[in-house]
Structures are given as C-alpha cells and as structure tokens.
Image (cartoon, rainbow, N blue to C red):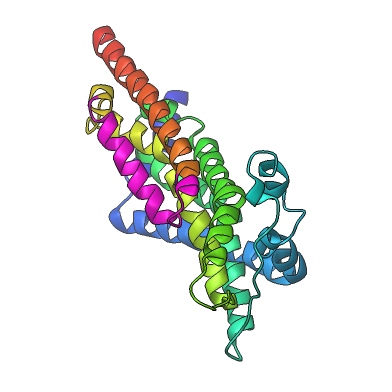
Amino acid sequence: MAKGKEVVKQEPEAEMTFLEHLEALRWHIIRSLAAIALFGIVMFLSKEFVFDRVIFGPKFNDFPTYKIFCYFINTMCQPPVFEVQTISVEEKFLTHIKVSIILGVVVAFPYVFWEIWSFVKPGLYPKERKAARGIVWICSSLFLTGVLFGYYIITPFALKFLTGYEIATTISSPTLSSYVSSIAFYTLPAGFVFELPIVVYFLTKVGLITPEFMRQYRRMAFIIILVLSAIITPPDVLTQFLIGIPIFVLYEISIIISKRVVAAQKAEEENS
C-alpha cells in the first residue's frame, strides 16, 4: 500500500499536460520578476550608496584597483579625470531606474537561476539530477565572479584608457546615461563569459563537444578569445590581455571538465 501511494504521488508531476507546464512556467517567471523588482526597489531606495560608492566608485582614489595595480603599473595609481553631465531633464531619473533594474537583475540572478532550474529539474532523470548537483551555486558564483571581475578590473582600465584618449582640444564629459551604459557593458558580458565551463559541461553531455576537439582547436580558441576581448574592452592591449587570460584559463578548465564528463559517460556505459 505504501508503494502504491508513493506511485500515485509521483504520477501527477510526471503526467503534467502542456497547459499545466505553461502554468508552472508562468509562476516561475512571475516569481523571478518579483525578485528582480524587489531587489530593484531596494537599489532604487539606496540611491546615495549605489551611485556614490558603486557606479562612481572607479572615479575615486580609494578604489581598490588603483591601490593594487599602482605597485605594478605607474599609470594606474590615479583614477581617470572626467566630469559626468546630463543633457536632458529626465536623464537623471531614467538612469536611476535603469541602474536599479540592472543591479536588481545582478543581485537576483541566483534566485532567478534557481527558478529556472526548478522548472527544468523535474524533467531530468535521477542520474542527470545527480550529475548537475550544485549547479545553481556554481552558475551563480561564476556569474557574480565575472561581474566583479568586469567591475574591478575591466572598468577601471577601460575608463582610464578611453577618458585619457586625446583628440585635438576635446575633453571627456560623458553623459550620465552613456557612463552607466559603459559600466554595464564592461561588467554584465564578463559575467556571462565566465559561464563557459557550465556551457561546455552541457555541450559535452549531449555530445556536441569533446575534450579532443577542444584541444585540437586550442590555438583557434585563443584567437577567438583575443577577438572577444577586443570586442568587450577598449583597444588597449593591456586591458585585452587582462580579460583574455582569465577566459583562456576558463577554457583550459573547461577541457578538464569535458574530459571528466566523457570519462564518466564511458564508465557508465561499461557498467550498464
């Protein structure tokens, strides 16, 4: 009887209709948007801290990057000098909302990814669930690490290079909106790029990538990484290598992950 009851409890989840799946997905999306909105509101109400210490942090002398890199690069001892301006009446308010939404997404990312995983997980086999154990924590850690890397490494070097670039008698006076867009461009893509090991893990699981393939095209991957670094960073060789080296390290780690996945699949086939 106990076994019969257990089977009955599992059947509704396994036999959900298409509309029931859509309903479940709808609630996952609603909860995710609610989390983003909640954190966005918190960021909106923390205007002084968000703008004075976070958004404009790279403009101050006490920013950690300048203190650390000053020992190695003399030109990084001082922050870039430039003035941020607004050219429209609504720019400050709209930018405030934009920043709140972006930070809301970043802070809520672990919860949003957990909601996505909660929707996908029931459709996986027990072995697949076991293999993907801890994926929410790993993905969230990689994303947040990438964002912090973009904020503390890419952003200061990019601002230093771009605001110090001289043409005739022009001066650097970016608008508030363009400045915030630049910060977002240097941080968010880095967060997604740092998800490379997870992407390789799943591509290996479905047979689209093998460790041999990744080793064979390592040189080509290195060139692609340099091109990618040039796209998401200013045309400064030092900055490009600062973002390129961690990506290449992630690529090498991804090869190890791919190798372990293949080895686990072979062991599973031999045992079955």
Residue 239 seen: yes
Q: Nearer the viewer, residue 138 or 11?
A: 138
Quick check: 7 left or right of 186? left
Q: As displayed, is residue 37 above or below residue 156?
A: below
Count of all numbered marks drawn on residues in the image: 0
Q: In the rendered image, which quarter is residue 247 located in? A: top left
Q: As displayed, is residue 269 above or below residue 244?
A: above
Report the residue that reaches farthest toward the front: 168
Q: Nearer the viewer, residue 12 or 145?
A: 145
Residue 145 percent across, percent down from the top left: 57, 42
Residue 206 percent across, percent down from the top left: 25, 32
In the rendered structure, which segment of residues is drawn in magenta?
A: 216-240
Residue under the point 24% across and 22% down: 212
| Quarter of the image that includes the N terminus | top left
Quick check: 144 left or right of 1? right
> Residue 223 colored magenta?
yes
Residue under the point 62% across and 68% down: 100
Residue 124 seen: no
| Quarter of the image that includes the C terminus | top left
Quick check: 255 left or right of 189? left
Residue 185 percent across, percent down from the top left: 48, 61
Residue under the point 70% across and 50% down: 77
Question: What secondary structure predominates along the stretch shown in magenta?
Answer: helix
Q: As displayed, is residue 171 above or below residue 4?
A: below
Q: As displayed, is residue 149 above or below residue 56?
A: above
Residue under the point 70% across and 68% down: 51
Q: In the rendered image, which quarter is residue 39 located in? A: bottom right
Residue 253 percent across, percent down from the top left: 42, 27
Q: Nearer the viewer, residue 202 or 95?
A: 95
> Residue 165 colored magenta?
no
